[in-house]
Image (cartoon, rainbow, N blue to C red):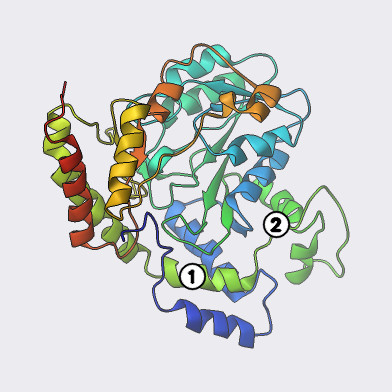
């Protein structure tokens, strides 16, 4: 059996969790949380990073910090996880979906400006599979129309665009440390804040609307309720688990990248024949091997291939159903322009097993099974 995903585990997690337990500080913002925050800040160059209970909650914090209000509009791709939209719908905003690029599955930067209206307040690029959106164009649009840019970099830890870390380019960035991500704390995330002036309010929002963080630093004698907020702090136990992986982040990155490159090498001939398509990494983008996917001819062929792999004990899965086709998507948003690629490409995409510790033999077994499926089939 070759599983689609196995959560990362380095062997240090147990030790660090017990250290957190023995410290009698397990509710959050302890030593391990601070280590994780500093690691993100040093790796990305962002002014401030704060661990959160999830990437969903990081995005909710970003929506609050961006002062999203009822009646505002927020532009994003439809090909993303529901959390990307939920954070803004909760603030009363209308989500405006635009089409994606078929090469990277990212938002088509050339369609964003036409979707801007007097009500638009933010653009939310989603860096699919850890491959960056075309951020120069997106940031230029944001500057000209005075819009906030909130990067959904859930899949983008250790990825970059023209030398800039994903999540640290826009006004705010959101990371995920869910068990399916390259680095995990089970459930968790982080918000990255570019402007130092926004840090104090971020700390308040994250601490249930109180100025408790200033109290803990000794800046005030008591803390009180001063703003909107919620409980966005993860447990110190989760942070301890994550720190075990961030310490070995480069090793995990190289391990995943080796599997990614092996997939690409072994499936390149099949792609050259026209049977499948492989991921595209544009110039200037450094990805993190978060995902390796192939594209079949259509949804029917993909369904057959999933079943074929399953018969051999290989778990391969499709991904997002476009949000604009969902009941809530129709209720809380609208698709601007024509859906040329979003639905078509999402119906073709198939994700292959990829995780820290995946063996070369397993990658080869997956590739051989895919080659068998396409053997003798008509190609382009």
Give the x, y percent position of residue 133: 41, 32
Q: On the rendered structure, is 30 left or right of 263?
A: right
* Label 2 environment density (alpha carbons within 10 Å; few <14, some 14–19, many ≥20): many
Query: Looking at the rendering, in which quadrant would you find the N terminus?
Result: bottom left
Give the x, y percent position of residue 197: 67, 46
Is disc 2 placed on a helix, strand or loop?
A: loop
**Residue at horizontal 45 percent and vertical 73 percent from the top:** 244
* Residue placed most toward the observer, 244 or 209: 244
Total numbered circles: 2
Spatial separation of the CA atoms under disc 2 and disc 1: 18 Å
Q: Quadrant of residue 275?
A: top left
* Residue placed most toward the observer, 375 or 77: 375
* Label 1 environment density (alpha carbons within 10 Å; few <14, some 14–19, many ≥20): many
Q: Quadrant of residue 324?
A: top right
Q: Is residue 114 above or below residue 311?
A: above
Residues under numbered marks 2 and 1 in contact, where contact means CB atoms less than 8 Å apart:
no
User: Earlier along the polypeptide chain: callout 2 or callout 1?
Assistant: 2
Query: Looking at the rendering, in which quadrant would you find the C terminus?
Result: top left
**Residue at horizontal 31 percent and vertical 36 percent from the top:** 304
**Residue at horizontal 68 percent and vertical 84 percent from the top:** 24
Q: What residue did someone put label 1 on?
A: 243
Q: What residue did someone put label 2 on?
A: 232
Q: On the rendered structure, is 47 left or right of 71?
A: left
Is disc 1 placed on a helix, strand or loop?
A: helix
Give the x, y percent position of residue 345: 38, 26
* Residue placed most toward the observer, 213 or 254: 254
């Amino acid at each position: 059996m070759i599983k689609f995903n196995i959560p990362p585990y380095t062997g240090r997690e147990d030790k660090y969790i017990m250290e957190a337990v023995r410290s009698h500080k397990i509710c959050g913002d302890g030593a391990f949380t601070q280590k994780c925050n500093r690691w993100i800040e040093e790796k990305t160059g962002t002014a401030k990073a704060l661990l959160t209970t999830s990437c969903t909650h990081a995005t909710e914090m970003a929506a609050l910090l961006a002062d999203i209000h009822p009646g505002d509009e927020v532009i994003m791709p439809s090909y993303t996880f529901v959390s990307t939209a939920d954070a803004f719908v909760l603030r009363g905003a209308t989500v405006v979906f635009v089409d994606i690029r078929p090469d990277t599955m990212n938002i088509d930067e050339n369609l964003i400006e036409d979707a801007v209206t007097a009500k638009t307040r933010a653009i939310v690029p989603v860096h699919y599979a850890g491959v960056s959106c075309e951020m120069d164009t997106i940031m230029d649009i944001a500057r000209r129309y005075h819009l906030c840019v909130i990067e959904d970099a859930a899949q983008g830890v250790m990825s970059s665009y023209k030398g800039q870390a994903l999540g640290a380019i826009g006004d705010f960035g959101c990371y995920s440390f869910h068990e399916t991500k390259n680095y995990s704390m089970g459930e968790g995330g982080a918000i990255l804040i570019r402007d130092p002036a926004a840090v104090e309010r971020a700390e308040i929002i994250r601490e249930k609307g109180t100025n408790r963080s200033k109290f803990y630093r000794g800046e005030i004698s008591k803390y009180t309720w001063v703003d909107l907020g919620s409980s966005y702090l993860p447990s110190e136990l989760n942070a301890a688990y994550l720190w075990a992986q961030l310490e070995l982040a480069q090793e995990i990155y190289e391990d995943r990248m080796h599997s990614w490159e092996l997939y690409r090498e072994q499936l390149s001939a099949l792609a050259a024949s026209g049977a499948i398509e492989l991921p595209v990494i544009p110039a200037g983008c450094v990805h993190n091997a978060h995902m390796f996917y192939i594209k079949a001819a259509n949804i029917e062929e993909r369904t057959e291939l999933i079943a074929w792999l399953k018969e051999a004990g290989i778990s391969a899965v499709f991904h997002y159903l476009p949000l604009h086709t969902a009941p809530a998507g129709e209720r809380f948003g609208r698709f601007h322009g024509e859906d040329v690629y979003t639905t078509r490409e999402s119906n073709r995409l198939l994700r292959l097993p990829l995780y820290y510790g995946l063996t070369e033999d397993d990658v080869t077994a997956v590739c051989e099974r895919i080659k068998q499926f396409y053997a003798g089939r008509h190609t382009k």
